Image (cartoon, coloured by chain):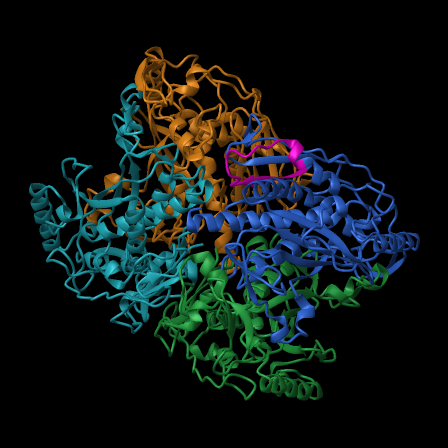
Chain colours: A green, B blue, C cyan, D orange
Amino acid sequence: MSSTLGTLYTVTTFGESHCKGVGAVVDGCPPGLELTEADIQPQLTRRRPGQSDLSTPRQEADQVTIYSGTEFGRTLGTPIMLLVNNRDQRPQDYGEMSRIPRPSHADYTYQMKYGVRASSGGGRSSARETIGRVAAGAIAEKWLREQYGTEIVAWVSAVGDIEAPPADLERISRAEVDQTIIRCPDTTTAARMQDRVREVLEAKDSTGGILTCVCRNVPVGLGEPLFDKLEARLAQAMLSLPATKGFDIGSGFAGTRLRGSTHNDPFVRRGSGLGTRTNHSGGVQGGISNGEPIVFRVAFKPVATIGLAQETVDFDGEPVTLEAKGRHDPCVVPRAVPIVEAMAALVLIDLALMQRARRGA
Amino acid sequence: MSSTLGTLYTVTTFGESHCKGVGAVVDGCPPGLELTEADIQPQLTRRRPGQSDLSTPRQEADQVTIYSGTEFGRTLGTPIMLLVNNRDQRPQDYGEMSRIPRPSHADYTYQMKYGVRASSGGGRSSARETIGRVAAGAIAEKWLREQYGTEIVAWVSAVGDIEAPPADLERISRAEVDQTIIRCPDTTTAARMQDRVREVLEAKDSTGGILTCVCRNVPVGLGEPLFDKLEARLAQAMLSLPATKGFDIGSGFAGTRLRGSTHNDPFVRRGSGLGTRTNHSGGVQGGISNGEPIVFRVAFKPVATIGLAQETVDFDGEPVTLEAKGRHDPCVVPRAVPIVEAMAALVLIDLALMQRARRGA
Amino acid sequence: MSSTLGTLYTVTTFGESHCKGVGAVVDGCPPGLELTEADIQPQLTRRRPGQSDLSTPRQEADQVTIYSGTEFGRTLGTPIMLLVNNRDQRPQDYGEMSRIPRPSHADYTYQMKYGVRASSGGGRSSARETIGRVAAGAIAEKWLREQYGTEIVAWVSAVGDIEAPPADLERISRAEVDQTIIRCPDTTTAARMQDRVREVLEAKDSTGGILTCVCRNVPVGLGEPLFDKLEARLAQAMLSLPATKGFDIGSGFAGTRLRGSTHNDPFVRRGSGLGTRTNHSGGVQGGISNGEPIVFRVAFKPVATIGLAQETVDFDGEPVTLEAKGRHDPCVVPRAVPIVEAMAALVLIDLALMQRARRGA
Amino acid sequence: MSSTLGTLYTVTTFGESHCKGVGAVVDGCPPGLELTEADIQPQLTRRRPGQSDLSTPRQEADQVTIYSGTEFGRTLGTPIMLLVNNRDQRPQDYGEMSRIPRPSHADYTYQMKYGVRASSGGGRSSARETIGRVAAGAIAEKWLREQYGTEIVAWVSAVGDIEAPPADLERISRAEVDQTIIRCPDTTTAARMQDRVREVLEAKDSTGGILTCVCRNVPVGLGEPLFDKLEARLAQAMLSLPATKGFDIGSGFAGTRLRGSTHNDPFVRRGSGLGTRTNHSGGVQGGISNGEPIVFRVAFKPVATIGLAQETVDFDGEPVTLEAKGRHDPCVVPRAVPIVEAMAALVLIDLALMQRARRGA
């Protein structure tokens, strides 16, 4: 179903830019987990706009409230409703804007799909919708950490054509990622990326980028053949985010150039079980986690809203020149970091519960 | 659910290499569609092994039978069971093999997940499982063609580091793709690719590759915000295929290097509606089809089974040298062409029926 | 999924007695429906406690707010979040109560299932949870009325052993039902029922009862073989309500005593199609609506909370005498009327959208 | 989805009367369960027609074959495809029959729903469809028995107005039930029932009846609030069977006449936990099993196909007299016994796996 993700740990999000609030209902969270707003707020705060001069100056507190599903600071096992009020709750008549579908936005497709013009244009395609996901993901992440010691860390590995060197997948931490406002752990590259974003902002233009994410301490055996393979579910989760255009895992697109003799990951003894010497598989074999770090990348296109004039047509097909007013994020990737982490957590907890149903532990 | 795909047009596949048969149950196919085995067999035949000297010489007829859901050559609207018998139905004791998890195969993860050793090792991760998908996809494709004139064409756009030039997305056809046994429409590149596959085969090694797929005449409005965005569902479908490591749509990973002013697709008048001048979006905006061709790529890793000796360990962690016997496909991408087309059709029909539920036509 | 109902029109409810609020997220409501709180509030008001001297005097306004999914008084086609704040938001230490599982309540089973003691005992089994259902049902009902002229009317047909004579299924209306506080359209029987409830209340005891519900102007063709047969979905919906113990449709349990020659409903010409002379089928044949009124009954057990002393044991198995304090509804059936109507509407809209997906209109 | 039941243990059935075969795909069966056709056949044999002079003399072997999902006599954890070939595989032109919708059959509603005339009239509403359910249920039942010692026994408790005295719920067994061909454990009542069925058969008429079913040794804690309450899922499962008109659990409809002081089930110490002194709840409180026997009833209407002449109209509304030819079951309830047991097993295993996912054991 379109607004619900998951089979056992389900997340149903609601809300758009100009309604009273946005949020999510989490159903299936195991009972007895210690949980208050303080467990959720940090990732929402990493997500909110206005964190640096690289982002829109719009300040929104995005303070979350738990409406149900907990008592005395513990989950009851019942649905957890998470609500963030919107500041600007008035639907607006966008005037001229409402006559012109913004290029590479969802204004046109929403209009054609629903037959209704939302004042926010693309309705639920707004980045604001991701608030519910981040809140739901923070709960999932807490449970995974307590059960398995799972750690999920995402970072900016490319802005435009500036690529960061490979990170140390065993050690990279959120603290390290947050050292720079662009959220690239390599500080030299980070500086170049930040310059690039400021340059693009100056030019009233925008840029794309790539996020890399690692999930460590994921138990062996997660992922359901066939259609719920771990990588299939991750791909769906990531491509369900606004502005994403690609996903790959392990060796990914680059690995298609290798030969099997180089690409195969030989097994080695690791503790009481097995590990692999290399990790071209990205922690997944046959759709199932193998205990190695899960590593994947997500491609984000350049932001569609730009200040530069664009020649396009209005809904009636009449030529118009469009210039976005106000100030917009020229690059979404730093703020996408906690969102990608949340989506990874949502996929992992659901598959972990599936496996627990099968094997009983 | 792991073996079922879709919400309204659902496909449940069954079968592994050494059981009595493989196939699928299709539920939700609209009634009244003309359908016999002859509509399904061609794509199965394009999928089967032994079609050329680039593939394993194993010959399997893969003849499909419709067991239910049709009468007098028309669908009843009831579940369609599609069955292909297996030739080799005896489960085997693989002897040595069963002690050694093959590197980058699913032997180890299946063992850990299920606690049961299947004689085929990776069980359902076998390529043979895709038979049910291809059969189910052929039905979906027929309905889409009759309803909307939808055309779905996939081809091999890279083998190892050999890349084909961009194809003409408006015209490329299956006939053109099938002119070469590697299924690359550019015959010069195709020849180089074929040489490469033979060379790899000679070396007892394997290679990866990339498929590109275009879907033309897809109606505007397909794709469900949020988690059932068209690209999210395509990504899940493609990454649920064996040996896939990546998916991108439209400008994809390469598009992250562009600026918004270049990347945005300006609208133009097209017929009674709108089109876009460029198609970096790949036919999808905000998760919803915009009427432009849908274009995406799928990355396939090099085949894991190779004849070259590999140093690895057995299930007990003891060092062993593994050499695969017999002959194996050194490159899966030509046979993956009808599989990718099938998965695309399965996603599109499901989203088309969802939209029909919403808008009533 | 436990807290979500439906395939295309989905309702996810949240909330328990002592959290901040209760409500629901409706996903899949068709776009363009005129909708404000005024469309929803009347059924919530019919549901709330304290409407008469037969009910607990606890007054709760149960005022609903639409948080998302509408703009300018119309639905956007996006999720509609409906929230009713709780008055008493403090979780409580029930003291003695928390040591004693109330007989025929959910205290014991919740404790065993979740391993967590909720201050409200049975957590989500509380009648308060039905608020989200009623709100979601009111929206469904409005859409059905506008599309097909569907009318859904439930009433109290039995209290204890007092049974009302059969109602006129073609004419009975909510106005008629609401003429008496017990919500039985036969005023003579209603008076006897009301006396009975007062007598039971006086005796610190409780009574059960039966609701009958008719759905008129339901289009032919709703209901999905197999597991989503119309009567199967209605049965699930009704038995998912607190305190229900039975469901039957058409001739129901009594019809098992008839012979086929009497029970069969012969067809007759009706307008441009067919109708049936009798309606033992209750408007459903083979799981699919046939255009006749859909008629079903729901059995509600006597309320479990009573003032009379009960000999039972505490969680440790020690004998105790339990006497409920305060005042409780001695009979839930009058307040269950809008709840049963809501559940019927939720089932019908979902199946109507399913059929629209299949046939395109 | 219409032909799929369950969330974790899913059953997808296929097939109608005149296609090549009927059966089911079971997905989610835990790995390592010993399973061959011999575990499944007995319940199919109890279900098949022609077992006595009370039933149609049509002889069908209904021999099941496991096509996938097992190896060396154990489940792999992958989908299990179960197939029973049809004897009469030719779709037929029913001639006159196809012009006349049979009263209280699904011919008319199927025609209106699908817009396609199946030669079998009501298509999937045929009793033959239940073969897949019985096969899938036999597997579920085996797993439940091995895990928890669960026992499921159904029997005929009423034929027309002949009612059996209450059975001993703690002891009643399938052997006892099968002592009489009518499957009523009270032999005196059974004799009267059998006479009644022969009398009805003689009169070319038919009769309805009631089944009662008990599930013993069901662990405490099964059933998911809200919409997947144990009784809600049972009600859906039972009302999804052909010819059913009602379901109640525990005290059911009769219990609505009691007062709370009589109806409440006081707790008692039982072993290391709690039990209840009485069992008006029928083993379920708040939608969750409480460890007591689960007891429910299912109402079956009189068989719609009768030899007596019926005045009705054809599809065009023209008056006709209809007389069914051949011989038909005058009473379905004895053959429904293994079907009801199967549906109960399917509900219980799915909820057991859900609870295992939550609590990890």
Can residue C26 be found in the magenta stretch? no
In the displayed structure image, the side of residue A159 where residue C122 appears, left or right: left
In the displayed structure image, the side of residue D213 where residue A172 appears, left or right: right
Q: Which residues are magenta?
A: B22-40
Quarter occupied by residue A270: bottom right
Q: Is residue D34 above or below residue B343?
A: above
Number of marks in picture: 0
Asked if residue D6 shows in the view, the reply is: yes
Image x and y of residue D217, in percent:
45, 45
Quarter occupied by residue A259: bottom right
Image x and y of residue D284, in percent:
36, 49
Nearest to the observer: residue C347 or residue A147: C347
Nearest to the observer: residue C56 or residue C177: C177
Can residue B32 be found in the magenta stretch? yes
In the displayed structure image, the side of residue A122 where residue D263 appears, left or right: left
- Residue located at (62% from left, 58% from top): B235
Quarter occupied by residue C248: top left
